[in-house]
Image (cartoon, grey):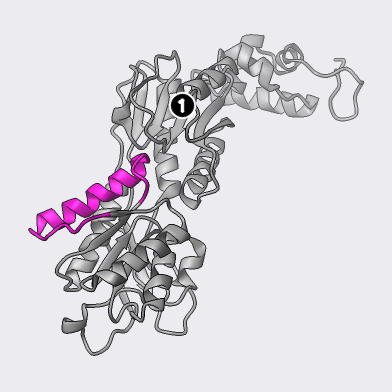
């Protein structure tokens, strides 16, 4: 038999028909093997893969798309920002897509862009993607996603219409509630909130989690100060909190604002956590190294991304199947040195402690240690 191409063969590239001839099967069977379809016996699959390896054959993406009717590409719409949360979630989506055997194409949107999410989705559809991820969008009003591919929305699913829309919970409200409950359990009578910009659905969810925790215990809800996610806005808010004179605990909607807040409190002569306790949100890498090390909620970016991609891939590959229920993301509180009981009720000493919420865990090092170790 004459071999075409392969490991030391001629210059002609091997084709699927050559693999079929060598393996003694039909060309359709070769396509089924390379597209991962069922109803191919293990013996036949082995023969096809061995023949392909012997010939040096690899099915290219264009041929795979023609054979399967799919591009095995997922489009992602994300806000064009370097903020830790959206950037980390995008990385998680890219990893999860790769693990599922899909390539990723990303389109960034900008705040104030009149085209917004709808325009980004249209751009991705023109590129022939099999499905679309809309990752933590901001509020652009009601957006109808009438498309012929499945759409996964990570955050704010109620804001997006469309019969093929699926949603994965990001868990921001549960995380915010756990952060507020941590401070209440330390003995603080009420908790102030440094919110994110309310055009962001993520900021709204954190605000609602804070409110829910206070309402559940019948506690007063102090006026909310909103920042813009930056440390500078946290610093400005910290000056307001310091001048109020009655603030003993603050839950900040992200770590950057919490760090700016702590700086302002310290400059005003207040000690953290002796006078004011502070909890952040995200667990950015630097949060373990600021002074004091920051207690924060760790966002489960990888867990959310993998759960979302599981739902999206099922919708792509089994469009007639009943949608699988979404699993709740883990809730993990990382306790460090920025939280303590309020001044009048403060315990004489605090050592290493562990806190957990719904299966999450966190570890606080004694003074002088580095960042906490996690499993």
In the rendered image, the residue lying farthest to the bottom is 348
Point 42% across, 50% down: residue = 228
Residues in magenta, as a range: 196-224
Residue 314 sits above or below residue 245 on the image: above
Instruction: Say which element carries label 1.
Output: helix
Point 37% across, 41% down: residue = 200
In the image, 182: left or right of 36? left
| Residue 73 drawn in magenta | no
Residue 110 sits above or below residue 125 on the image: below
Point 45% across, 28% down: residue = 313
Which x, y percent locates residue 242? 31, 71
Residue situated in front as seen by the camera: 217 or 99: 217
Which x, y percent locates residue 129? 55, 21
In the image, 268: left or right of 92? left
Residue 65 sits above or below residue 182 on the image: above
Q: Quadrant of the N terminus?
A: top right
| Residue 214 drawn in magenta | yes
Tell me if residue 355 can be seen: no
């Amino acid at each position: 038999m004459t071999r075409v191409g392969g490991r030391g063969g001629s210059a002609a590239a091997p084709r699927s028909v050559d693999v079929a001839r060598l393996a003694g099967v039909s060309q359709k069977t070769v396509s089924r093997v390379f597209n991962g379809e069922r109803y191919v016996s293990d013996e036949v699959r082995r023969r096809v893969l061995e023949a392909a390896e012997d010939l040096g054959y690899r099915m290219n993406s264009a041929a795979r798309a023609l054979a399967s009717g799919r591009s095995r590409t997922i489009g992602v719409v994300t806000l064009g920002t370097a903020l830790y949360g959206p950037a980390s979630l995008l990385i998680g989506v890219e990893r999860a897509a790769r693990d599922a055997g899909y390539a990723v194409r990303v389109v960034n949107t900008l705040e104030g862009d009149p085209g917004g999410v709808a325009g980004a989705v249209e751009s991705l559809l023109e590129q022939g993607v099999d499905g679309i991820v809309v990752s933590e969008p901001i509020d652009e009003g009601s957006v109808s996603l009438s498309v012929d591919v499945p759409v996964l929305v990570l955050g704010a699913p109620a804001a997006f219409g469309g019969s093929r829309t699926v949603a994965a919970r990001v868990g921001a409200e549960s995380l915010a509630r756990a952060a507020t409950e941590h401070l209440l359990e330390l003995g603080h009578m009420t908790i102030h909130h440094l919110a994110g910009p309310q055009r962001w659905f993520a900021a709204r969810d954190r605000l609602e989690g804070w409110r829910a925790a206070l309402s559940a215990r019948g506690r007063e809800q102090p006026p909310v100060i909103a920042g813009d996610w930056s440390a500078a806005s946290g610093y400005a808010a910290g000056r307001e909190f310091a001048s109020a004179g009655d603030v003993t605990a603050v839950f900040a909607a992200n770590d950057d604002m919490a760090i700016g807040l702590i700086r302002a409190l310290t400059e005003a002569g207040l000690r953290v956590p002796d006078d004011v306790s502070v909890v952040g949100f995200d667990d950015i890498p630097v949060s373990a190294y600021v002074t004091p090390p920051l207690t924060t909620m760790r966002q489960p970016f990888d867990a959310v991304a993998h759960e979302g991609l599981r739902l999206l891939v099922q919708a792509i590959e089994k469009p007639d199947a009943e949608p699988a229920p979404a699993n709740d993301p883990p809730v993990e509180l990382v306790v460090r040195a920025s939280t303590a009981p309020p001044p009048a009720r403060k315990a004489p000493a605090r050592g290493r402690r562990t806190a957990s919420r719904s299966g999450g865990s966190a570890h606080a090092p004694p003074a002088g240690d580095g960042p906490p170790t996690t499993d």
